[in-house]
Image: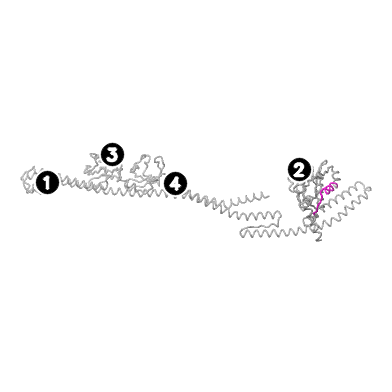
Amino acid sequence: MLMSESKNNGNLHRRFVMRVLAPPFVALLLLSAATIWQLGNILHRQAIDGLKRSATTTAATLEREFALRETILKQSGTELFVIKSEYNSDRKQLDDNRDACRAHMQKKFTFKDAPNGVCEPFRGGFAGSNTGNLASLENEYVLLGEEMIQDQNQRINERISAFKQFFPETLALLIINDKKQPVSSAYSGIFKASTNIFQPDAESALVGSIRGKLATAEGYQLAVFAFQIPGGSVLAAYDLQNENFIRQVWESAPIDRTRTLALLLDSTGSPAYPILKDADGFKTSINELHHEPYINIPLDNVDHTVVGAPAGSSNWSVAIASPTAAVLATLRDAQLAAVVVIGLFMVGFVWVGTFFIQRTLRNIVSLVSGAMVFGSGRLDYKIALDHADGEFVRLAETMNAMAQRIFDVEKSVDEKNKEFISVATHELRAPLTAIIGHLSMFNEMYDKKLDDKAKFLIDQAYYGSARLRDLVNDMLNVARLESGRSEFALTTVPIKPVVEDVISTMAVVAKITNVTLEYKHVHEADVLADEQRLRIIINNFVSNAIKYNRPGGHVIVSHQVQDNLLVTCIEDNGLGIPEDQKAHMFEKFFRVEHEDRKSVTGTGLGMYITKEYIEQMHGKLWFESSHGTGTKFYFSLPIVSPPLRTKIKKIIKQKLARK
């Protein structure tokens, strides 16, 4: 019963948890999964946005660097072009003056009065003299030409020096006119006489700008810039590996260089700085890099997440590459932290929910258990709830009050029924005793005068009345037991004479049914009992052992001493008790139902009365039986030892003194 109730409580707990906790738990679990997924997306976007900001910032710096170079290069190219143009103009004017002065001298043999002052530039060589000859004119012309060249070279060198102060990584500077002819140039020593290397790019700049074109010459990695200027174009070639070029831009990238790499890409998508060993593996579509949030590219066999940003109008780009594992590390850490936090929250939710459910469930189980106890007939039971809510307390009080009212009503009805049974049995017993006595006397007086049919009818009336008397006596005994009016006079009773007397009485019945009675009185002792009730107990056991036996069977009564108790065994080899009916053996009006005992009569009260009598005398009753092979009934009673005997005598004296 306890195991069944515990199992039912466990099932109720599981159902309650499944119906109350499971839906919100599943909802929270799904919400948590969606939150972790969304958190992952947010953190991943933040990581990509961080890389994108670094790329955009670096690209802006690169654009400013290129814009500065363009401005200074154009300005320097224009100034150099102007210097060259002025030189060419001045030299032409000098040549024209020389030719006109020569013609004048050939005609006049003097510098004086030359038309348009054509001889004025040459007169300084003669200290203001107005006389001269053609040889002196030529010498003066050569000197003035050399001075003009020196002045031009000085101005060019000053301009180029100023340019190189800004950009010391410059390896070549070239200016051409609109006729694609070199106007001015400056090279490092290794590039001397190498104008033809840069001529095509300078010519291309006449129709379109070149910003950072990568080239290789004389073992150098170069970045070529060429722009159109008034009257021609200007070109500069920079050493990519020089720290004064774009290294400073590269180093200014706001990144964690232990985890991230900044790359400056040219218009083809190739890394311009730094130079990578695995450059071919990095080449990608610039359009893809600029139009996608990010792309994945393997570098040195490691998957990298790459974002890019264009550097203005330079056709260059900035790429920020970070190992994908590093990008996802923060994401994984955050997701792990979220999982831990959500896991703790879910555990807390389940723990708190289970706590409150168990508290509520305890109250419900107490109410259900109380209802089951009430249903079993124990209406005097009280449902007690500890720390329960008001509704449960009021429900428990209502159920207790309802059970109490039912108990009071049943008790009142039961008492009236018992009183009725007691009165009825008392009233029935007197006439039944008279009828039985008269039938017995009639049978003795007229035994020889009655024919067989009349004698049969008289015997049937006699036996029927005797059975009715036994039923009335049993019901009266039951009524007394249940009403508490049965008084037991517990005294020291030697069990052997009682058993022998019962066996002697039942010997005639046993002989008629061909059953052998045997009494093994070894271990017999004095017991604490009511002698009259003890006689009834043994009589019921022996009577049933004979009644439910077979012809030729046997009944054995024996004793054993166990822990100051006398255990009496009544054993038979009769019909036995079916397994499915053993649990009802000591219930009122219960009789074993089976084909092998249909002819056996009885009231079904004998075993119930026997059990009550034994327990009233502080004993216990049990049995062992196998259907078809026999039954052993055991009952124990306290053995009266000398100390107990003295105590009993003292109690009896006290009762007599009260009377």
Q: Does the stretch in magenta take in 503?
A: yes
Residue at (67% x, 50% y) in the render:
2
| C-alpha gap between disc 4 and disc 1 | 81 Å
Mark 2 to mark 3: distance in Å? Answer: 116 Å
Where residue 534 appears, as percent x and y from the top left, is 81, 51
Quarter holding the C terminus is bottom right
Question: Magenta part of the protein: which range?
Answer: 490-504
Toward the right, the furthest residue is 449
Q: Which residue is mark 3?
A: 217
Sequence-wise first label, 1 or 2: 1
- Which residue is the site of mark 2? 627
Q: Which mark is residue 329?
A: 4
Instruction: Identify residue for label 1.
Output: 97
Comparing 82 with 502, the one in front is 502
Q: Secondary structure at mark 3?
A: strand
Q: Are marks 1 and 3 in contact (CB under 8 Å)?
A: no
Mark earlier in primary sequence (4, 1): 1
The answer to whether residue 599 is visible is no
Looking at the picture, which amino acid does disc 4 mark?
Answer: Ala
Task: Tell me whether circle 3 and circle 4 mark residues in contact (CB < 8 Å).
Answer: no
Q: Residues within 10 Å of mark 4 (few under 14, many from 20)?
A: few
